Image: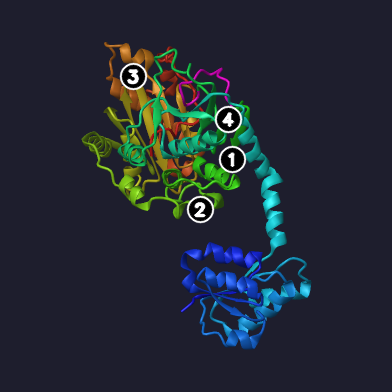
């Protein structure tokens, strides 16, 4: 029994029939054009010859459709047919094409009877707006910038890239290849988080790990693009004076961004959302591995649509769901956990200190910096805790990861206040990070306090001072600065080598 009834056999109706041709047995067409009726019959489609707005013709069909599509080329016929369809097939979903030159009366009649109205004039206007409007101009400028790269393009993520950075870089690489670029997706640092290693391996992404010690590592590349961060030498190990061709990022910049093409949209919750927009504007089908990666990138950066999410993120995710490999996503999200990660989470729990609703924990020496983020997330589940910070020391650098939930504070700004002058710090309102090079402190052997005690005093006091200055609700009157405070630390660490970065949410989610 056909479940879809198509009224009309003009170009629009035939295009619809062709789109549904994978299951012609479910379609029945009514048309007054006997020649086209014969053509459809030879293709295996059931056809009745008759007036599409004739009640007797439609009532005589041996059809109880779930969907009725009214799509003749005449606006008056479509209006009349919509009335009959509304009477005879009231339970069916009715999609009605207005046709061109539709009058106000005909449009009103169609809108009163159809569940969905398709107006070709509106579609053309919307299409032109997407092409020549601000967003359309942005897409053309990106395409032009990519075409102007003659040779090998390096698309560089921030250090220790997270899924959003990786997926965005791979997606941009696909767009660049379409305009003739040779592409390498590059990163400095490591991908050590179990979930992110599974992400890269399962989706078979081809990434290049750049060696910061190799002075010639960038020689093979003729152009550079940055994704999920916006300045060379800031949150990556590129030369600060490097000429950049393309920057695409969703983080708000703290300093001017220079590149031949710049797209900074801080309203979006993930850079992956911006890449989905480009694929849609270029009308390019997103390959399954890339769609899977972009969907995961959006989910991770918005914390499953609970953090700094926008309507654009939901729309991008909806576009990706039918194209992504959901089985692969499930496997990515359930990786094995290393013994080191469990050990760090355990030390974070054991060493926790609470001031008001802020919980801090120093885990000492560590070998996996990404476990700090997992520990900070885990501690945030404790009762009466609204913000956490977990930190430790790796290769002469203090790494810190902070999380907040329902707090009246911008955690990224608090971390910048606390550590921006002695190291690198930044992030989002409820997820941020920092890193501070120990410098001279790490080489002093005959100090009165242990290195861990000094680190704990410095980090705790600076962070709590910053939180206190931005939110009295989190700490109230319970916090008073310790004797070894930031002023003392500033004197001791005058030789600290601190490189300020713009966003330190490079810790892998």
Magenta-colored stretch includes residue 287: no
Q: Earlier in the sequence, mark 4 or mark 3?
A: 4
Disc 3 or 2, which lies upstream in sequence?
2
Q: In front here: 481 or 421?
A: 421
Q: Earlier in the sequence, mark 1 or mark 4?
A: 4
| Front of the two marks 2 and 1 | 2
Residue at the spot of label 1 = 265
Q: Which residue is mark 4?
A: 246
Q: CA distance from mark 2 to mark 4?
A: 25 Å
| Residue linked to disc 3 | 396
Choose the circle earlier in sequence order: 2 or 1: 1
- What residue sits right under mark 2 in the picture? 319
Report which quarter residue 474 is drawn in. top left
For the residues labelled 4 and 3, say whether their Cβ atoms are less than 8 Å apart. Answer: no
Comparing 405 with 355, the one in front is: 405
Q: Position of residue 30 (x, y in %)?
A: 60, 77
């Amino acid at each position: 029994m056909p479940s879809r009834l198509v009224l009309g056999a003009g170009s629009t109706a035939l295009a619809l029939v062709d789109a549904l041709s994978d299951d012609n047995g479910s379609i029945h067409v009514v048309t007054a054009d006997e020649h086209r009726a014969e053509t459809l019959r030879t293709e295996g489609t059931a056809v009745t010859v008759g007036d599409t707005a004739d009640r007797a013709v439609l009532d005589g069909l041996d059809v109880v459709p779930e969907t009725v599509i009214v799509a003749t080329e005449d606006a008056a016929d479509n209006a009349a047919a919509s009335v009959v369809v509304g009477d005879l097939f009231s339970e069916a979903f009715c999609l009605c094409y207005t046709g061109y030159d539709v009058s106000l009366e005909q449009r009103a009649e169609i809108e009163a009877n159809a569940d969905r109205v398709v107006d070709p004039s509106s579609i053309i206007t919307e299409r032109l707006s997407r092409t020549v409007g601000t967003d359309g101009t942005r897409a053309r400028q990106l395409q032009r910038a990519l075409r102007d790269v003659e040779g090998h393009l390096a698309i560089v993520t921030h250090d220790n890239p997270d899924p959003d950075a990786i997926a965005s870089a791979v997606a941009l690489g696909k767009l660049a290849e379409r305009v003739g670029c040779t592409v390498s997706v590059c990163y400095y640092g490591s991908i050590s988080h179990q979930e992110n290693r599974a992400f890269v391996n399962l989706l078979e992404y081809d990434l290049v790990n750049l060696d910061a010690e190799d002075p010639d590592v960038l020689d093979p590349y003729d152009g550079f693009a940055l994704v999920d961060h916006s300045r060379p030498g800031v949150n990556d190990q590129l030369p600060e004076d490097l000429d950049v061709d393309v920057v695409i990022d969703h983080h708000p910049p703290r300093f001017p961004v220079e590149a031949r093409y710049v797209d900074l949209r801080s309203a979006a919750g993930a850079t992956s959302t911006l890449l989905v927009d480009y694929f849609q504007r270029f009308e390019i089908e997103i390959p399954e591995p890339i769609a899977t990666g972009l969907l995961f990138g959006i989910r991770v950066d918005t914390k499953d649509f609970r953090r700094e999410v926008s309507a654009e993120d939901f729309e991008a995710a909806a576009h990706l769901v039918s194209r992504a490999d959901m089985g692969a996503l499930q496997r990515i999200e359930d990786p094995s956990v290393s013994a080191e990660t469990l050990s760090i989470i355990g030390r974070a729990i054991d060493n926790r200190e609470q001031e008001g609703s802020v919980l801090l924990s120093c885990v000492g020496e560590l070998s996996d910096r990404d476990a700090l983020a997992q520990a900070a997330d885990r501690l945030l589940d404790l009762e009466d805790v609204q913000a956490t910070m977990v930190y430790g020391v790796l290769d002469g650098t203090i790494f810190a990861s902070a999380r907040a939930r329902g707090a009246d504070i911008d955690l990224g700004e608090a971390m910048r206040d606390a550590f921006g002058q002695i190291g690198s710090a930044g992030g989002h309102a409820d997820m941020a990070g920092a890193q501070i090079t120990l410098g001279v402190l790490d080489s002093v052997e005959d100090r009165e306090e242990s290195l861990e005690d000094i680190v704990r005093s410095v980090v705790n006091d600076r962070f709590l001072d910053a939180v206190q200055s931005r939110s009295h609700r989190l700490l109230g009157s319970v916090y008073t600065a310790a004797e070894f405070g930031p002023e003392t630390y500033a004197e001791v660490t005058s030789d600290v080598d601190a490189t300020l970065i713009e966003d330190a949410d490079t810790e892998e989610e």
